[in-house]
Image (cartoon, helix red, strand yellow):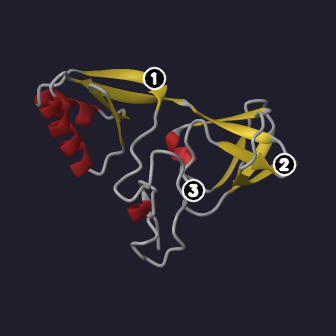
Amino acid sequence: MLLIESLATADGTASERLLLPFDMRCKSRLRTRLASGEECGLFLPRGTVLRGGDRLLASDGRIVAVVAAPEALMAAASDDPLQLARAAYHLGNRHIAVQILPGSLRFGRDHVLGEMLRGLGLPVTEIEEAFEPEAGAYGAHGGHGHSADGDGELAKPRPRIHDHFQPK
């Protein structure tokens, strides 16, 4: 089994691809398969969130490109920024991971949430697309993040969206 223990820091062309949905890209320990079918194990620093386009360094020196897999999502669209902000507020109030795009919001397929947004006047459609939700208030940027060592200092933000669900 191929081991992957770090992000690639050197330039180089990826020779492998790792296709994962968002919930799997939030796991630092994972047994999975590359697009080629080869089995691999991720042993990344705790709290690492992989994003589509990230590159990983395998134990044998190969570079593996992370690809965000298409997922069952819902998209709510509006030309009215206030209406979108209201929808984002209600989704965030329910601790839902949300991808914010110009004129639309994407979130994991959930018919109850879809009906809630329709009730706010937004058209909601079901789609299959890659999902790259916001990193959250403590995420330094939209790219991959690295967690703190768990000591709770604000100077060391924890960018994972679901950290509050993880045992401390």
Amino acid type at circle 2 is Met
Pick the residue in front: 65 or 24.
Answer: 65
In the depicted structure, whether residue 153 falls above or below residue 142: below
Instruction: Residue under label 2, please give it.
Output: 1
Q: Quadrant of residue 98?
A: top left
Amino acid type at circle 1 is Glu
Distance from the alpha carbon under mark 2 to that under mark 3: 21 Å
Distance from the alpha carbon under mark 1 to that under mark 3: 25 Å
Residue lying at 43% horizontally and 61% vertically, measured from the top left: 163
In the depicted structure, whether residue 1 falls above or below residue 72: below
Left or right: 109 as drawn, with respect to 3: left
Label disc, if present, on residue 18 of the rendered structure: none
Amino acid type at circle 3 is Thr
Pick the residue in front: 39 or 104.
Answer: 104
2 or 3: tag closer to the N-terminus: 2
The reply to whether callout 2 and callout 3 are in contact (CB within 8 Å) is no
* Residue 41 horizontal/vertical position (percent): 74, 51
**Dot 3 alpha-carbon crowd within 10 angstroms: few under 14, some 14 to 19, many 20 or more:** many
Instruction: Residue under label 3, please give it.
Output: 48
Left or right: 13 as drawn, with respect to 113: right
Residue lying at 24% horizontally and 36% vertically, measured from the top left: 112
Instruction: Residue under label 1, please give it.
Output: 128
Q: Does dot 1 land on a helix, a strand or a loop?
A: strand
Left or right: 150 as drawn, with respect to 16: left
